[in-house]
Every structure is written in structure tokens, then in C-alpha cells.
Image: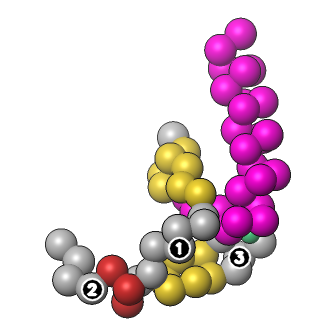
Amino acid sequence: MVDDPADEWFSCAVCGASAPGPPITWMFDNDRRRGGLWYCERCARDNVRAVEAKLDQDWW
Ligand SMILES: [Zn+2]
């Protein structure tokens, strides 16, 4: 129920950078404990590895 998503600010879960609206270059991750998390373009690259590693751990 958001009339204007552009009014929303998203902050990076890693470095704390913030940007208005849903940043298309950012990555969204749904963490079981912390809920929905956003990662800025820069941190997303690092996070992809972490997420994959985490998934591997859960999987194996
Ligand atoms: Zn960041």
C-alpha cells in the first residue's frame, strides 16, 4: 500500500549507504532472521559470495 515508492529510502545492510526509491542496481535478500535486506551495488557483489557460501553450508 505505497502510493509513491520513490518516497521510500533504502539503506544498505552492509555499508549503510542510502538511496531513494527501489534502486534497480541494488540487490534484495530475504534473510530469515533479519527480514528483507538491501545491498548496494558494491556490497551486493561481495554479498553474492557470502550468500552462496551460506546456502552451501545450509545445503550440505
Ligand atoms: Zn553497501
Q: CA distance from mark 3 to mark 2?
A: 23 Å
**For the residue with label 3, is its CB less than 8 Å from the closest atom of ligand 1?**
yes
Disc 1: which residue: 23
Disc ID at residue 16? 3
Secondary structure of the residue carrying numbered label 3: loop
Q: Which SS does the magenta portion mostly show?
A: helix
Q: Is residue 6 left or right of residue 46?
A: left
Figure check: 10 above or below 59:
below
Q: Secondary structure at mark 2?
A: loop
Question: Are the residues at dot 1 and dot 3 in contact (C-beta closer than 8 Å)?
Answer: no
Choose top left, top right, bottom left or bottom right for residue 38: bottom right
Q: Mark 3 or mark 1, which is nearer the start of the sequence?
A: 3
In-front residue for pair 42/35: 42
Residue ID for mark 2: 4
User: Of the residues shown, which amino acid type is indicated by label 2?
Assistant: Asp
Q: Residues within 10 Å of mark 3 (few under 14, many from 20)?
A: few
Check the image and report above or below for 22 versus 36: below
Quadrant in which the N terminus appears: bottom left
Amino acid of disc 3: Gly
Q: What residue range appears in magenta?
A: 37-60
- For label 2, the crowd category at 10 Å Cα-Cα, with few meaning under 14, some 14 to 19 and many 20 or more, is few
Residue at the image position 78 percent from the left and 30 percent from the top? 53
Query: What whole-number distance in Å separates the C-alpha atoms at marks 1 and 2?
Result: 14 Å
Secondary structure beneath dot 1 equals: loop
**Can you name the residue that lies furthest to the top here?**
60
